[in-house]
Image: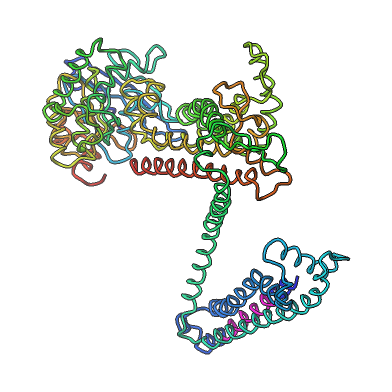
Amino acid sequence: MKLLIALALVLALAGLAYLAGRARATRLTLAAGGRIGAVHSRPVYHGAYVAVLALAPALIVLAGWGLAGEGVIEGRVLATLDAASQPAPGPDRAALMNEVRGLVAGDLPQAFNPLAPVLAPRYAATKTNLDLLAGALAVALLCLGGLWGYSRIRPDFRARNRVEMQVRILLLLASVVAILTTFGIVLSLIFESIRFFRMVSPVEFLTGLAWSPQTALRADQVGSTGAFGAVPLFWGTIFIGAIIAMAVAIPLGLMSAIYLTQYAAPRLRRWLKPVLELLAGVPTVVYGFFAALSVAPVVRQVAVALGMADASADSALAAGLVMGVMIIPFVSSMADDALAAVPRAMRDGSLAMGATMSETVKKVMVPAALPGIIGGVLLAVSRAIGETMIVVMAAGLAANLTANPFSSVTTVTTQIVALLTGDQEFDSAKTLSAFALGLVLFGMTLVLNIYALAVVKRYREAYE
Amino acid sequence: MNQNPAQKPAIGHNSVPKMTARDVNVFYGQKQAIRNVSIDVTSEHVTAFIGPSGCGKSTFLRCLNRMNDTVDGARVEGRIELDAQDIYAPAMDVVQLRARVGMVFQKPNPFPKSIYENVAYGPRIHGLARAKADMDNIVESALRRAGLWDEVKDRLGESGTAMSGGQQQRLCIARAIAVDPEVILMDEPCSALDPIATARIEELIDELRGRYAIVIVTHNMQQAARVSQKTAFFHLGTLVEYDDTSAIFTNPRETRTKDYITGRYG
């Protein structure tokens, strides 16, 4: 709340700096007679330059304090205790400081830790002082920056070029945010996975055939030895996402792309293509209950009719079929692009030989577009193996290593959901295994994506 | 236009025309690209279509093997006959028509397949070879007639797209003659080639004359004068003049023809 007030104050002051800078530059321009070039930059640029010089350091101070301030305050407050009574870093200290903060805010009527009531007034005082100090520092820097910028306004000062550079830096920062976030995610995956691999060896994890992540809460519990062989999970993921789903998506996607690019009248194509792409906009959870409620029972009936009396309601086939339908738009839109990129001369050359349309498609168009089509299929596979909702709702949790499409299998994503749903202790192998699974999944999709994009790119170059 | 040249006794009227067109009109949507064109094409001559860009010469050429069917919104009116059969009649099968009337395009467009497979493409589609040896013969004779055999006989398995532009275009000609068509349509076949490759193609056209009825569209008037015996001058979608090539270039009847070949416009 205080931070918000400080932010508003800083922004308001920066606004003033802008107005002041612009006003001064306007006066200069008028004094110079208003010719183009008499004053290098237009007044708005001078104003913007002054505002940025004022705003940037103040924002950096406020952001830094917002991130690091609490740690500094805690350190100071705890330093007032003598060394013996200071709680050790970790959960104890965090619990104490939580109570202190609760007492200060008035949310907590009574603290358990006897130290908390002692520390509360010290905490309140330190926080007020340091917050004020940070705010004052920000405003001071703002004024200094603003005055410096204001003093630099001269007819020959190239404010426009400086502002252009500042805009460029801003855009760079914006584009770096997504990349940095990805790095952060990967790092957190890696750190948690390392903790997991201290408890379970990577060899067992990557090659073990049994998956049963139950670990004991008490030493005397039955079934307390967890098994962390993830091969059944990898198999289930590939079975559903890369085999069954692709068996549906590749032929249907490819054929619809061929129809749309080669056969459909332009007017029909204008309608059909967006409708097909709408499929990609259906939330996956909707596909999930369609798979669980509509497709799975039918699949089970087929299995029973085929003589599998104990067929499960959750089946790889049901999840894979629906996932395949979900993936059709990806395959078809990539194949569409690839086919459309084949030069028209190629198609005309074949038709002029007396080939029919389907001969032309089969013998010339598809072979020529094959790299692009393969790239699209690989991207679709990477999406399918990362897909979660359909398999959670329709594939089941039993880690079976089987090639029978009617039996229940489980996937990496399903297990991650199961492992991390509900209350979990974060120091057990059971919970941490989710991160190792996530890391493997990330690695698989990353490799697939890189390879697919490389294939698609090489193909594009070939025809441009 | 005060006279329609094709309605006068056709030049070379001692021979039966291979293809005849009468009052052909072509529309792209609302726009009319060809107006009332009538012309005869004979087997023993090379016929050149000349005219400024956008005059409709390529559009008209593409009517002769119904390639305009593949263009959305294109509509052809009038009557075009091949050996006195109406090629736009419902009874005419477009696959068979194109086997009889082959085409070579402006830009060499070999398929991304081997040299052998490029030439074998048409014979395979039309089932012309029973055994591998038959196909080998067809491919060899087509490549020989296209003057390409000696250059490629040791590398028939290499990709057709890896050759030079001139070789690619001769490969496309070999591909067209592999199905032994009766007419070959060439749509500015040398416009993407250098002068040496162009001369090679022109020689080839001369060698093929008499065996096939050849129609060549060109915007290069010297080329028309070199390779053709008959020349048709198109302007703004109409056929202005059609006569022996020597007559067109030395003694044109129409002022528009004269202006064009003397470089007044176009």
The quadrant where residue A317 appears = top right
Q: How is the image coloured?
A: rainbow
Counting from the top left corner in percent of width and height, residue B85 is at 32, 13
Q: Is residue A18 magenta?
A: yes
Find out whether residue A21 is within the magenta segment: yes
In this orientation, does residue A328 appear? no
In the rendered image, residue A27, in percent from the top left (x then y), is placed at 57, 87
User: x, y (%) of residue A108?
Assistant: 85, 65
The correct choice, above or below, for A311 with respect to A41 in the image is above
Nearer-the-camera pick, A368 or A270: A368
Q: Position of residue B164 (x, y in %)?
A: 19, 38
Name the quadrant of the N terminus of chain A.
bottom right
Give the main secondary structure of the magenta stretch: helix
Nearer to us in this view, A421 or A159: A421
Report the span colored magenta: A8-24
In the picture shown, does residue A341 fall above or below B7?
A: below
Q: Which quarter of the figure has residue B201?
A: top left
Residue A378 visible in the current orientation: yes
Residue sticking out furthest to the front = A220
Q: Is residue B246 above or below residue A83?
A: above
Number of numbered markers:
0
Relative horizontal placement of residue B69, taking residue B6 as reference (left or right): right
